[in-house]
Amino acid sequence: MKKIILHPFLFAVYPIIFLYSYNAQELLINQIYLPIIISLLSTLVIWGIMGLLIKDRIKAGLITTVFLLVFFGYGYTFDLLRVSGVIAVKHRHLLPVFVLLLGYIIYFIHLSKKNSALEILSRTLNLMGIVLIIINLINIVSFEVKKMNLQKQTYTSDNVKTNLNNADNYPDIYFIIMDEYASLDTIKNIWGYDNSWFADSLKQKGFYVAEKSTVKYYETTKAIPSYLNMEYVDSKLDMVTCFQKLNNNQVSEYLMGMGYEIVAFDNLYALNPGKGKFTSDYQFDFKEAGAEVKSADDFSMILINNTMLRAFNYLFKLSYTYNMSRNATLYTLSKLKEIPTEVPDPKFVYVHLLCPHTPFVFDIKGKEVDPVNNSNWRDKKYYLEQYIYITKEMEKTIDEILKNSKTPPVIILQSDHGPRGNSSPNPSENIDIPTEEKLKIFNAYYLPNVNKNILKENVSPINTFRIIFNTYFKDKFELLED
């Protein structure tokens, strides 16, 4: 029993389980299966080769484990050095250091004559590996139990009605979120761009543009659930609970009771299924429509960036996130124009466009951006050009919705929060944006056959659906403080 050697396999699995545990709220458990299989098979091959070369199982096992620790620790070390700012670290400098360190340790283990000490070290590593995996599995199981209930939990409200008799007279409702879209003030203050032309264009179409709207949160996971439940959510809620509130929200439930079909362009789910699906009658997923780019998934890309393979990530010409974000936006813009005639009335259409949120994948004309700049906030042209592109495309999309709708629809066009400027893993690419700018949003309403005086220039998204339900369904929701 003393010579049972488990640690190479334990440390082949541990970095993957640790990374998943750290991101368990956002990922699916099946995303770790393939990386684990590849890691275990590679470990078996390395251990077998080392065993044949040095004719010692214990030494071969220790060398294999050391290789795994160095291999999986490279990305973390690279990030630590880069964030510290002590040195301008480059892969061409750090990678040779890691290779030399690995070679030296392997040489030291090979020359070692103290077999008893090596056996103790091997047993210690066995114990460490088991403990580390158990700790992370406990965390994973906790989140997986929560995620199992992600689609089961529904929300009931005393205000939900069942009124199908007048459904034919109700307007379609479009709720369109442009993620991290700057307000008129913010884009002018920080980027020097005057976007008033867009506001003026919307006003000419009949929109009311609330130019002084602000929000309480600059996190999507808090913002959208609060809007769709018409109440402020606890800022301390964990991410899984936030997505439960998003996917099974009171606005959708209320409108279902009024005879509405629920339509979702939930790109947050489409890009990352770990967040759960928005409860709906129609779910338009760009991947199911054949717009998916076959590539490593997001978890695999994160894992690769934490290993020595990160030094060669330039070989991955376009990252998973880059391709998927671009395709999700293009598909949604195209398909959304068809919804007025494709889905029966009345319908509630929820659209979450992950644009102009990073990655920056569109230039001002919609052409591809060099992936090396997909999170470059420092050069302000990348956010600005993507911002201008999605603005022009949204104007065209709104024109098509209005033109193709049988009766004038309600359209809410909002940003969930302002730009934050800090999503790059490279600190040198981030910029500081004042908190007040992050909390300013773009907020526009098309409310047909209604006096626009019911809206104020500082109206908050928390009251969006309270106002709509009171206006079109003669309900009596109390308005919350903006």
Image: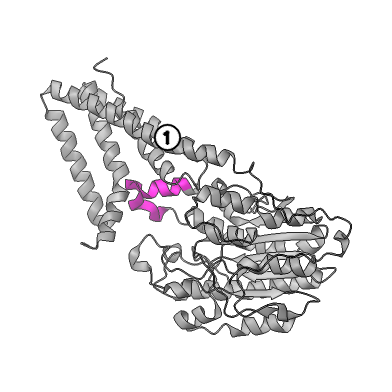
Q: Where is residue 205 in the image (x, y as percent from the top left)?
A: 74, 81
Mark yes or no: residue 4 visible.
yes
**302 in magenta:** yes
| Three-letter code, disc 1 | Ile
Q: Position of residue 139 (x, y in %)?
A: 43, 38
**317 horizontally vs 244: left or right:** left
Q: In which image quadrant can residue 203 be found?
A: bottom right
Magenta segment: 299-315
Q: Say which residue appears at 75% left-offset and 74% top-offset.
A: 447
Q: Where is residue 183 in the image (x, y as percent from the top left)?
A: 54, 76
SS class of the residue under badge 1?
helix
Residue at the spot of label 1: 138
Q: Which of 471/141 is in front?
A: 471
Mark yes or no: residue 89 visible.
no
Label 1: few (<14), some (14–19) or many (≥20) C-alpha neighbours in 10 Å: few
**475 in magenta:** no
Q: Where is residue 227 in the image (x, y as percent from the top left)?
A: 61, 62
